[in-house]
Amino acid sequence: MSASPADVTAEASRRRSFAVISHPDAGKSTLTEALALHARAIAQAGAVHGKGSRRGVVSDWLDMEQARGISITSAVLQLTVDDVVLNLLDTPGHADFSEDTYRVLSAVDCAVMLLDAAKGLEPQTLKLFEACRVRGTPVITVINKWDRPGQEPLALLDEIEQRLGTLPTPLNWPVGIAGDFRGVLDPATDTMTQFTRTPGGATVARREELDAAEAARRHGREWRTAVEELELLTASGQVHEQAEFLAARTTPVLFTAAVLNFGVAELLAAITSLAPPPQAWQDVQGRPRPVDAPFSGFVFKVQTGMDPSHRDRVAFMRVCSGRFERGMILTHGASGRPFQTKYAQSVFGRERETIDEAYPGDVVGLVNAHALHVGDTLHDGPAVRYPPLPRFAPEHFAVVRARDTGRSKQFRRGIDLLDQEGVVQVLVSDRRGAQAPVLAAVGPMQFEVATHRLEHEFGARTVLEPLGYGIARRTTASATPAVDGKHGAEVLRRTDGTLVALFTDRWRMGTVETELPAGSLLPMFDTG
Ligand code: G4P
């Protein structure tokens, strides 16, 4: 059964695809679980026995993360709220932080930036925000852990404005300082939503709507402070305007205590009402392919060994246009060959369900998709190619060698494939030779995945020798002689031809840079 363009447009317009960007410990897992709890609670409203439970699908996902070993789960949590379909794409953090984390951001239409109220902007958040900024992705900011002592809300907003250069516009404002979270003031209605803890935060928090007079009576000084602070922000123009948010010039801000489920319903409402639905995706020539055009999608991530009992390989594809139907025979843009989609699944932690259809904004897991690589386009009907995914600045470097020189052929084949797949970046130089390439990664987990695969898929056991570099910059052929070997720096070549200069630290890089013409060292972040 095929879908008319109008059906596809209608399905696309009710989708919101987003990811949470945060530093480890800010509360991403807790918030994810709270969002699922609220969505389920909403879905079950009216059901006689509909009660939220903290265990369930989400916990499976978390269990899986804990038990995972080498296979890192990345999943898409799909929730339906008031007829809006939310696709929450997981952005691996902690030890799993890798280039994949950034690539996920290439497949979403919006991001939720989650901050710890005590810590404000942290390094990983800044890096991920930068990836959103480069793509122009709109960002909703959530200040979490408001139930614990933290910074002043105005100071947090100031930090966002100063360091990110985007104007924070509060959608609500906390009543009570960090550590004394009583509820939120909604400037749109001039009312307060008062939150009451439920034991263990296991169920949706009890909420009570108070008008301004009642809020003032119950919360006196705290209410007045919230009103005054919001007035200050309003006077300085920090008011949400949808067009400014969509242009990524402003970021709406909400306050939560995810662990208590405070403010989570407000966040869900903000995502469903403000986050943009999928738009026409731009192809490699910059031409937009409308959402109702024939099917197209691109692979933003390839994962191997997710199911320990099989040596499988899942390619995660974001649908950009048209309706995906399992069993369709698509065209693989890179090779022009037909691609069978019999084994399409939605992958959610350990749970895999066969997926029969998907629409723009959805993610399809294509199982055993050995021909697919990160950045590949699949399409039906008129050909389309989406831009390659950007490469990101590596911060970890190590020389890799085959342990057994008799396996050097297998080793080279493995390295080439891992490079092509974007598992790690591979850097070479004449000095080091082809049998001792340098692997460059955003996170050290990428090395583990690479060496594991070299051993198990290619039969090449390896030795990894970490290098003391911490910074990479693109450089030019003319600057290379003045960089290579200076102050411990080294210049290598990436397979796409990019010359990459590695430095141990900023200080030494600065010393080298002062002797070079301007523009000799450029940030590694490609925009794709
Ligand atoms: P992450 O995925 O971003 O790394 O963070 P995660 O959700 O695992 O949360 C990190 C810690 O912060 C957890 O505590 C979690 O309970 C706590 N947390 C998350 N949201 C809030 C919040 O709104 N308020 C408060 N007070 N704490 C929050 P933990 O000590 O690591 O574990 P637990 O023993 O508390 O479960």
Image (spheres, helix red, strand yellow):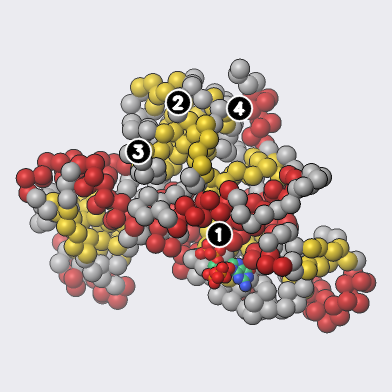
Q: x, y percentage for residue 55?
A: 61, 54
The Cα atoms of the two marked residues, 2 and 1, are separated by 31 Å
Task: State whether label 2 is within 8 Å of ligand 1.
Answer: no
Classed neighbour count for the residue bearing mark 2: other residues with Cα under 10 Å, few (<14), some (14–19), many (≥20)? some
Can residue 170 be seen here?
Answer: no
Question: Can you tell me which quadrant of the image ligand 1 is in?
Answer: bottom right
Q: Is residue 201 at least partly visible in the picture?
A: yes
Work out whether mark 3 precedes mark 4 in sequence or the reverse, and give the earlier one: 4
User: Can you identify the residue that label 4 sits on?
Assistant: 292
SS at mark 1?
helix
* Side of 363 where 176 appears, left or right: right
Please name the amino acid that badge 2 sits on. Thr
Q: CA distance from mark 3 to mark 2?
A: 19 Å
Left or right: 384 in relation to 415 = right
Which residue type carries mark 3? His
Distance between mark 2 and mark 4 Cα atoms: 20 Å
**Residue type at the position of mark 4:** Asp
Residue furthest left as drawn: 406
Q: Quadrant of residue 261?
A: bottom right
Write down the residue under mark 2.
341
Mark 3 secondary-structure assignment: loop
**Quarter where residue 32 is shown:** bottom right
For disc 3, the marked residue is 310
Left or right position of 510 against 176: left
**Label 4 CA crowd tier, 10 Å (few <14, some 14–19, many 20+):** many
| Residue 29 badge | 1
Mark 1 or 3: the one toward you: 3
Neighbor class of circle 1 (other Cα within 10 Å; few <14, some 14-19, many 20+) is some
Tell me the distance, in whole angstroms, between the alpha carbons under discs 1 and 3. Answer: 27 Å
